[in-house]
Image: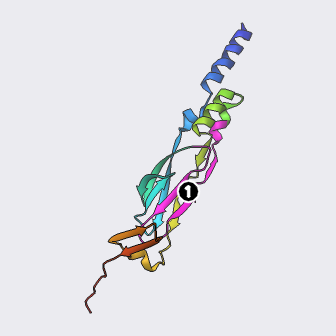
């Protein structure tokens, strides 16, 4: 009788403890994103997420996750979000199914809880403030003509 109870207990615990990180800590994290100056649009893996300062909800993954900060008049900044091992995954013990689920959902990793404070660098281009009215491209002559309207300032 004890032997059957012990086997049942092992089977039940392996079922309930499988994919522990996915069940107990989820598959997303909040990541705080700040920029100087504020108001930069943040793209996570190419998808618009928020404007700084903000808390973005980001799905966990095994691969790299990129955050791109864009603001007019400033150089675009691309960073890789830092991750660490999620210790809740250890509760999978010897359950290959649990490890597989946690790896597939990315729950075996978690994003670093520290905020990202990104300093954006001003563009130093003469043409960074120029807004062309018309652009003509001649592929035969291999020329590009850019037409702008000159801004008049009162002296």
Image: 34 above or below 83: below
Asked if residue 68 is among those painted magenta in the image, a careful observer would answer yes
- The residue under the point 45% across, 53% down is 55
Element at badge 1?
loop
Left/right of residue 2 with respect to residue 128 in the rendered view = right
Image: 65 above or below 10: below
Residue, disc 1: 114
Q: Quadrant of residue 87?
A: top right
Give x and y (percent) for residue 141: 46, 71
- The residue under the point 62% across, 27% down is 17
Quarter of the image with the C terminus is: bottom left
Taking the view exactly as shown, the residue that stands out farthest to the bottom is: 155
Taking the view exactly as shown, the residue that stands out farthest to the front is: 140
Q: Nearer the viewer, residue 45 or 82?
A: 45
The residue stretch that appears in magenta? 61-89
Left/right of residue 100 with respect to residue 24 in the rendered view = right
Q: Nearer the viewer, residue 155 or 132?
A: 132
Taking the view exactly as shown, the residue that stands out farthest to the right is: 3
Give x and y (percent) for residue 140: 46, 67
């Amino acid at each position: 009788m004890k032997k059957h109870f012990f086997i049942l207990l092992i089977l039940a615990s392996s079922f309930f403890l499988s994919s522990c990180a996915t069940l107990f800590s989820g598959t997303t994290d909040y990541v705080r994103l700040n920029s100087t100056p504020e108001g930069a649009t943040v793209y996570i893996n190419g998808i618009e997420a928020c404007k700084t300062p903000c808390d973005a909800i980001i799905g966990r993954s095994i691969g790299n996750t990129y955050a791109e900060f864009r603001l007019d008049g400033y150089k675009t900044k691309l960073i890789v979000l830092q991750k660490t091992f999620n210790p809740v995954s250890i509760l999978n013990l010897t359950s290959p199914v649990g490890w597989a689920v946690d790896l597939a959902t990315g729950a075996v990793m978690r994003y670093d809880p520290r905020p990202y404070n990104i300093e954006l660098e001003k563009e130093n281009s003469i043409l960074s403030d120029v807004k062309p009215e018309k652009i003509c491209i001649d592929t035969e002559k291999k020329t590009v003509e850019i037409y702008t309207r000159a801004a008049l300032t009162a002296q």
